[in-house]
Image (cartoon, grey):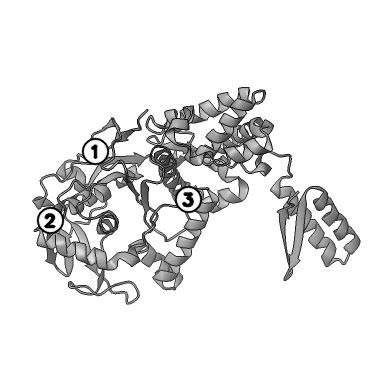
């Protein structure tokens, strides 16, 4: 069975055929690191993660997955000014937060994770090439892309000229030849947030960053197989990427474009003013990565996901059902199932068939739920369930389905023990420690702090 994806470029579902069957390339727009990631950021990372896992089952070891870090942006500068710190302090802090959140969410690490600040020479070089091609011009200390020179401009979004300007993130300035022209390089008045260039001290425009990183990694005259991101990036960001990448190359910029829908909270768009922004940090403190993954996969990726309290409750109940059903597999079977993430397609099961049809994750969830009913009394189905769970990144650690205490109960007992120790009631403190040991929890006191872990037994 072949992978089929809805291609935003053609507005229809297409069979995926890579340029080179020995090297599949995929790029996804990563985060702008100026604040804590929220569930919208999590969905934008999880959907490509599922596709990446699927691609690896078809092309094991031959998938080049690029997800960037945007560490140069006006939002970063604004946050730095508000907090009275250098922009790099903001970008470095939230890069670490993002990567830690992604690791906790069991998102596979990309093949390449370029940062804009590491590619400044490539960005300046590409702007030179665009100017030399006749598609760029310098005006008022800015370098701009001349969209009038691109007869194919608008091919992705299929917007009319008025639609490209109204309501879009396009700055209309007097120095532009056309209102839809966009910035490649702009001056910077912040000493710590700019670079020397032939056009003066400044920093790159948003769109040139992704194009430069892609071309530097895969080559100017190579075609990217797949490009992803949120559907809010279709215009102007991805439209402008195509324009930039096409004018300096002999090859098509990208063959397949896929975009995920927005995450709503109780049918409303997340915003600070509404106070409904759900941070990934907060979710991870309350729920396991597997529960969050199931919740984010509950709607088809191309549709909006309406996040409610019931969304996470349903995911939690389903996960309990799944881990209970796989509990009958033996120790040897467990370790085999734990290695099932990259099963070659010749050994795959129904889950890869389902995902191959435009990443149909709601149907995957239905399939897992059905399989859990038979897995309780059938070791083969339990094994299939365990492999399927592992394939979509759900935790198969033994503590997931063993009768282990809840983390909150452990933390509450540790707090109780700390209170006894403060009161110098060491007998009661030791009794709490013994109780935790009976529960399979080991404590370690160091530098006035208590850490815990499950015992090896």
Q: What residue appears at the point 58 percent right and 34 percent down from the top-left corner? A: 386
- Neighbour tally class for label 3: few under 14, some 14-19, many 20 plus, Cα within 10 Å: some
> Which residue is tagged 2?
146
Estimate the spatial distance between the alpha carbons at disc 2 and disc 3, rounded to whole Å.
35 Å
Residue 136 place in picture, x, y as percent: 13, 60
The disc, 3 or 1, on the residue closer to the chain's N-terminal end is: 1
Residue 325 drawn above or below residue 447: above
User: As rendered, which of 135 and 218 lies closer to the eye?
Assistant: 218
The disc, 2 or 3, on the residue closer to the chain's N-terminal end is: 3
> The residue tagged with tag 1: helix, strand or loop?
loop
> Which residue is tagged 3?
38
> Which residue is tagged 1?
9
Residue 435 shown left or right of residue 158 in the figure: right
Estimate the spatial distance between the alpha carbons at disc 3 and disc 1, rounded to whole Å.
28 Å
User: As rendered, which of 256 and 2 lies closer to the eye?
Assistant: 2
Residue 161 place in picture, x, y as percent: 15, 44
Residue 115 place in picture, x, y as percent: 36, 62
- Neighbour tally class for label 2: few under 14, some 14-19, many 20 plus, Cα within 10 Å: many
Estimate the spatial distance between the alpha carbons at disc 2 and disc 1, rounded to whole Å.
22 Å
> The residue tagged with tag 2: helix, strand or loop?
loop
Q: Nearer the viewer, mark 3 or mark 1?
A: 1
Residue 120 shown left or right of residue 435 in the figure: left
Asked if residue 338 shows in the view, the reply is yes
Residue 228 in which image quadrant: top left
Residue 242 place in picture, x, y as percent: 21, 49
Q: What residue appears at the point 13 percent right and 44 percent down from the top-left corner? A: 152
């Amino acid at each position: 069975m072949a992978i089929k994806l809805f291609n935003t470029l053609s507005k229809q579902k297409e069979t995926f055929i890579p340029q080179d069957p020995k090297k599949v390339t995929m790029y996804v727009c990563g985060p702008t690191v100026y604040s804590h990631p929220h569930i919208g950021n999590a969905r934008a990372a999880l959907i490509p993660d599922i596709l990446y896992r699927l691609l690896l089952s078809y092309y094991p070891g031959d998938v080049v997955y690029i997800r960037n870090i945007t560490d140069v942006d006006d939002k970063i500068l604004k946050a730095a000014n508000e907090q009275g710190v250098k922009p790099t302090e903001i970008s470095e802090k939230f890069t670490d937060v993002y990567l830690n959140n992604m690791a906790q969410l069991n998102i596979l690490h990309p093949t390449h994770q370029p940062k804009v600040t590491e590619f400044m020479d490539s960005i300046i070089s590409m702007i030179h090439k665009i100017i030399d091609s006749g598609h760029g011009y310098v005006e008022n200390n800015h370098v701009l892309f001349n969209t009038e020179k691109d007869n194919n401009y608008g091919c992705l979004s299929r917007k009319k000229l008025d639609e490209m300007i109204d309501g879009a993130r396009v700055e209309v300035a007097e120095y532009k030849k056309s209102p839809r022209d966009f910035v490649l390089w702009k001056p910077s008045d912040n000493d710590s947030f700019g670079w020397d260039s032939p056009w003066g001290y400044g920093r790159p425009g948003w769109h040139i960053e992704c194009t430069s990183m892609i071309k530097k990694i895969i080559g100017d005259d190579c075609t990217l197989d797949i490009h992803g991101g949120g559907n809010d990036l279709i215009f102007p960001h991805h439209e402008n990427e195509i324009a930039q990448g096409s004018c300096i190359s002999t090859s098509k910029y990208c063959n397949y474009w896929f975009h995920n829908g927005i995450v709503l909270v109780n049918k409303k768009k997340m915003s600070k003013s509404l106070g409904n922004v759900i941070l990934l940090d907060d979710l991870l403190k309350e729920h396991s990565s597997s529960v969050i993954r199931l919740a984010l996969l509950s709607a088809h990726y191309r549709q909006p996901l309406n996040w409610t309290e019931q969304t996470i409750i349903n995911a939690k109940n389903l996960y309990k059902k799944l881990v209970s059903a796989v509990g009958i597999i033996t120790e040897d079977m467990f370790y085999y199932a734990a290695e099932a993430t990259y099963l070659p397609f010749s050994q795959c099961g129904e889950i890869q068939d389902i995902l191959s049809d435009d990443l149909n994750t709601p149907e995957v969830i239905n399939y897992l739920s059905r399989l859990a009913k038979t897995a309780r009394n059938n070791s083969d189905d339990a094994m299939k369930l365990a492999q399927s769970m592992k394939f979509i990144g759900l935790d198969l650690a033994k503590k997931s389905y063993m009768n282990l205490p809840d983390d909150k109960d452990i933390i509450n007992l540790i707090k109780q023990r700390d209170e006894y120790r403060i009161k110098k009631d060491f007998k009661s403190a030791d009794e709490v420690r013994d109780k935790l040991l009976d529960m399979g929890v080991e404590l370690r006191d160091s530098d006035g702090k208590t850490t815990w872990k499950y015992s090896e037994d």
